[in-house]
Amino acid sequence: MFETLTDRFEGILTRLRSRGRLGDAEVAEVLREIRVALLEADVNVAVVRDLIERIRVRCTGAELSKSLTPAQQVIKVVNEELTETLGGEPLKITYASRPPTVVLLAGLQGSGKTTAAASLGRYFRQQGRNPLLVGADLQRPAAVEQLRVLGLGVGVTVYSEPTDPVTVAAGGLEEARRLGRDVVIVDTAGRLAIDEELMEEVRRVSQVVEPHYTFFVVDAMMGQDSVATAEAFNETLALDGVILTKVDGDARGGAALSVKQVVGKPIAFVSTGERPADFEVFHPDRLASRILGMGDVLSLIEKAEREYDQQVAEKAVERLQSGRFTFDDFLEQLQQLKKMGPLSGLLGMLPGVPKEVKNAKIDDKDVSRVEAIVHSMTPAERDDPGILDGSRRLRIANGSGTTTTEVNNLLRQFKEMQKMMRSLPMGKMLGGGGGGSARAKKNGRKAKKGGRVTPSSRHTR
Ligand SMILES: Nc1nc2c(ncn2[C@@H]2O[C@H](COP(=O)(O)OP(=O)(O)OP(=O)(O)O)[C@@H](O)[C@H]2O)c(=O)[nH]1
Ligand SMILES: [Mg+2]
């Protein structure tokens, strides 16, 4: 699902991150790339134009955040605007104060209404509700039977009778009241948008059951056609939302990205397979992150933005990359990281961090002892742990109320950390890639000219 877009965005964002400063020209280029990617993914032209314009205004405007690099800012803006285009907040069902809450499903032939009806039955059961399915599709001989089989699978009773759709719908509502069911899901016959007779039928069903929610079930693989039919149905039925089905077969995702803006109604649920379990509430923010191929990286950026001092981070990254990371930097990082909460939580969000590292338990008490050790070092020692011989280590242990074993352990871990940090994508994440590493390289050269020896190369054990 959305493979095309995800692939394209991956390339765009990687190139973006490898840049330092972003001028208007760079932003314009990125926007052009995003525009092409969206059009290729079959997103409605007007939707693309509007989205790009919103991103452009925010990226060239004064909305700057001190704690983020330019690339991170662009990614953040794109993510937020993409989320908005997809509908913003997920739809939240409000249950009728006088049950049952009635849900009516309509849509073209074969769009997945009956499957969605059963999936909704399962969903409402999971929400602690007691739904009833109503089979009002008397068009296709096997339709009610299909619903019964699916209903059995999800443990929801099906009501139907061989009369006519309007009578069935009214009867279903009565039955639900009699049985004390609090949600009624009405499955209707598939129709062609142009079929006036069938449109009239669903309109009458709607009049008699007065649904709280009318969902248009639409096949995502139809691309922009699905958006157009949703629009047509919205005129007849006043939709509350769209259920986008067969998303598993749609690599482009243009429909999902266009529905909200074109039809003016949000996507309420998505179906990604034939089983009722392949059905979920649609979360615009999660989909945007997935399209951007960012996953939890976005939450990391948000977290960093909230609590991390970018300058401190950038400096640390530069020093790490140039191999000049000292115990002073280490102390600073420890303090920053303590502000951000459990270390393992933070590491867990970074892509490419080995499981062993993620699962490592770091406890606050340990952190205080480590801080005590570092505080007992002289500035020269912090700057260059390589000079820490036996007698210095003993002095530090005594000064910090620890043991030489602890001091030795810390020194060993520090060295290992330097090695590990250099292989982590932290530089890209927090220092903003190109900008940071370019400066780091410069620092590296400066260091060499000054005859500086890195702690790790001088440190002998
Ligand atoms: N791959 C995939 N198949 C689906 C999905 N939803 C439904 N289907 C399949 O699509 C076909 C049509 O689904 P139905 O639920 O019968 O569609 P309908 O809208 O009720 O069809 P009519 O009642 O004939 O108008 C069935 O074979 C379903 O198993 C989905 O999300 N992904
Ligand atoms: Mg059906």
Image (cartoon, grey):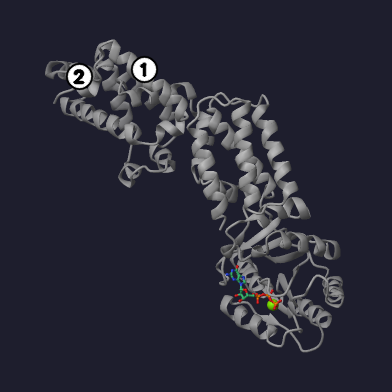
Disc number lying in front (2 or 1):
1
For ligand 1, the image quadrant comes to bottom right
Q: Is residue 97 left or right of residue 13?
A: right
Neighbour tally class for label 2: few under 14, some 14-19, many 20 plus, Cα within 10 Å:
some
Q: Is residue 161 visible?
A: yes
Disc on res. 329: none
Labels 2 and 1: the sequence-earlier one: 2
381 vs 107, nearest the viewer: 107
Query: Are discs 2 and 1 less than 8 Å apart at CB?
Result: no
Cα distance in 3D space between marks 2 and 1: 20 Å
The quadrant of the rendering that contains the N terminus is bottom right
Q: Position of residue 409 (x, y in %)?
A: 20, 30
Q: Which residue is drawn at 54% across and 55% down?
A: 3
Q: Position of residue 210 (x, y in %)?
A: 83, 68
Q: What residue type is labelled 2?
A: Gly
Q: Is mark 2 on a helix, strand or loop?
A: helix
Q: Please, is residue 162 above or below residue 335 in the view?
A: below
375 vs 147, nearest the viewer: 147
Q: Can residue 313 be seen in this view?
A: no
Q: What residue type is labelled 1?
A: Asn
Q: Position of residue 443 (x, y in %)?
A: 36, 17
Q: Is residue 448 left or right of residue 292?
A: left
Q: Please, is residue 278 above or below residue 365 in the view?
A: below
Q: Position of residue 196 (x, y in %)?
A: 87, 74
The quadrant of the rendering that contains the C terminus is top left
Residue where numbered disc 2 is placed: 386
Q: Is residue 92 left or right of residue 202?
A: left
Residue where numbered disc 1 is placed: 443
